[in-house]
Amino acid sequence: MSLSNYEELAAIALFGIGLTLLILDRNLIKKIIGFSMSDAGIYLYLAARGYVEGRRPPIVENGVTDAAAYINPIPTGLVLTGIVVSVASSAVFLALAVRLYERYRTLNLDEITDRVRKEEE
């Protein structure tokens, strides 16, 4: 049995693991890691789907201007833009996690929620 779409399967597995961490774990740092893993899975999937065997990068060489000879640059641009956005988002999430830890001395989301409710009373 030949496995030809292993990049897509790896991307789906990575996204699934990240989404599971994001949804089920109560630790904020693990949630941020899950967010980053699911992002990486999406980027891997887009990069794998954007690649076409036998085509070249979209740089005109030797006067070849036929679009069928080149890879579509849009998925690559989306991946690069997404990476920049996810790095910025992760930095903001980590900064918020540090502030929450400084105030509540825990990263457990349930404990933070309980302490916030007690403060509101």
Image (cartoon, grey):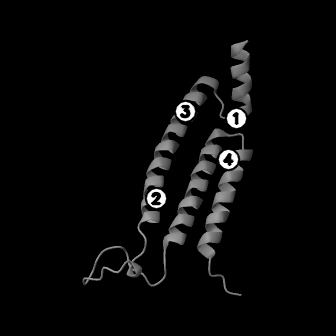
> Residue shown at 73%/12% (left/top)?
121
Mark positioned earlier in the residue sequence (2 or 4): 4
Which residue carries the number 1 mark? Answer: 108
Local packing at callout 4 (Cα closer than 10 Å; few below 14, some 14-19, many 20+) is many
Q: CA distance from mark 1 to mark 3?
A: 13 Å
Which residue carries the number 4 mark? Answer: 22
Quadrant in the picture for residue 30:
top right
Q: Are marks 3 and 4 in contact (CB under 8 Å)?
A: no
Compared with 56, 32 (above or below) is: above
> Residue shown at 73%/17% (left/top)?
118
Q: Are marks 2 and 4 in contact (CB under 8 Å)?
A: no
Which residue carries the number 2 mark? Answer: 78
Q: Amino acid at mark 1?
A: Asn
Mark positioned earlier in the residue sequence (2 or 3): 2
Local packing at callout 2 (Cα closer than 10 Å; few below 14, some 14-19, many 20+) is few
* Residue 23 screen position, x and y as percent: 71, 46
The mark lying in front, picked from 2 and 3, is 2
* Residue 105 screen position, x and y as percent: 64, 27
Q: Amino acid at mark 2?
A: Leu
The mark lying in front, picked from 2 and 4, is 2
Numbered label attached to residue 96: 3
Q: Amino acid at mark 3?
A: Leu
Badge 2 marks a residue whose secondary structure is helix
Numbered label attached to residue 28: none
Q: How many marks?
A: 4
Q: CA distance from mark 2 to mark 3?
A: 27 Å
> Residue shown at 71%/27% (left/top)?
113
Mark positioned earlier in the residue sequence (1 or 4): 4
